[in-house]
Amino acid sequence: MPSPQVLASLRAFVAERDWDQFHSPENLAKSIAIEAGELLECYQWSSAPDQNRVEDELADVVTYCIHLANKLGVDLDDIVVRKLEKTAEKYPVRLAKGRMTKYTEL
């Protein structure tokens, strides 16, 4: 979960602009995908893109993820840990270590 300072800053930023009215889960999910595309675009023609641009785009993705989690009332730490547990079952270390094979083919 982001620090309390980051959460407070994000909430204040949105409140000052009265943007929460536009932050439906659907709109936030779309924004995550759009910003992830912009992050990927940084690597489109180079494996060594401008670091500042990458950081800006990554910050946009993370910001929208935080907003969506807040809107859905979910704790990011909790959902990440739960997902890691599920993924660990699909990819046991003894079968997956050092491999990028899909779990159905391990």
Image: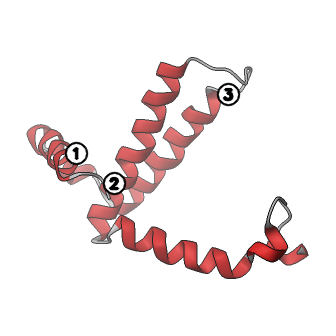
Q: What residue type is labelled 3?
A: Tyr
Q: Could you say where residue 9 lies in the image, as x and y percent from the top left? A: 16, 42
Disc 2 to disc 1, C-alpha distance: 10 Å
For residue 26, what is the image quadrant? bottom left
Q: Which amino acid does label 2 sit on?
A: Ile
* Local secondary structure at mark 2: helix
Q: Which amino acid does label 1 sit on?
A: Val
Disc 2 to disc 3, C-alpha distance: 24 Å
- Assess disc 3: are there few (<14), some (14-19) or many (≥20) residues with their C-alpha within 10 Å of its C-alpha: few
- Assess disc 2: are there few (<14), some (14-19) or many (≥20) residues with their C-alpha within 10 Å of its C-alpha: many
For residue 71, what is the image quadrant? bottom left
Residue plotted at (34% across, 63% down): 69
Residue plotted at (11% across, 45% down): 15
> Are the residues flagged by discs 1 and 3 in contact, CB closer than 8 Å?
no
Residue 51 higher or lower than 6, as above or below:
above
Residue sitting nearer the eye, 105 or 72: 105
Residue sitting nearer the eye, 55 or 22: 55
> Are the residues flagged by discs 2 and 1 in contact, CB closer than 8 Å?
yes
Of all residues shown, which one is farthest toward the right?
105
User: Residue 70: which numbered mark, if any?
Assistant: none
The tag earlier along the polypeptide, 1 or 3, is 1
* Local secondary structure at mark 1: helix
The tag earlier along the polypeptide, 2 or 3, is 3
Q: Mark 3 points at which residue?
A: 43
User: Residue 66: which numbered mark, if any?
Assistant: 2
Q: Could you say where residue 22 lies in the image, as x and y percent from the top left? A: 26, 50
Q: Is residue 40 left or right of residue 30?
A: right
Q: Mark 1 points at which residue?
A: 6
Quadrant location, the N terminus: bottom left
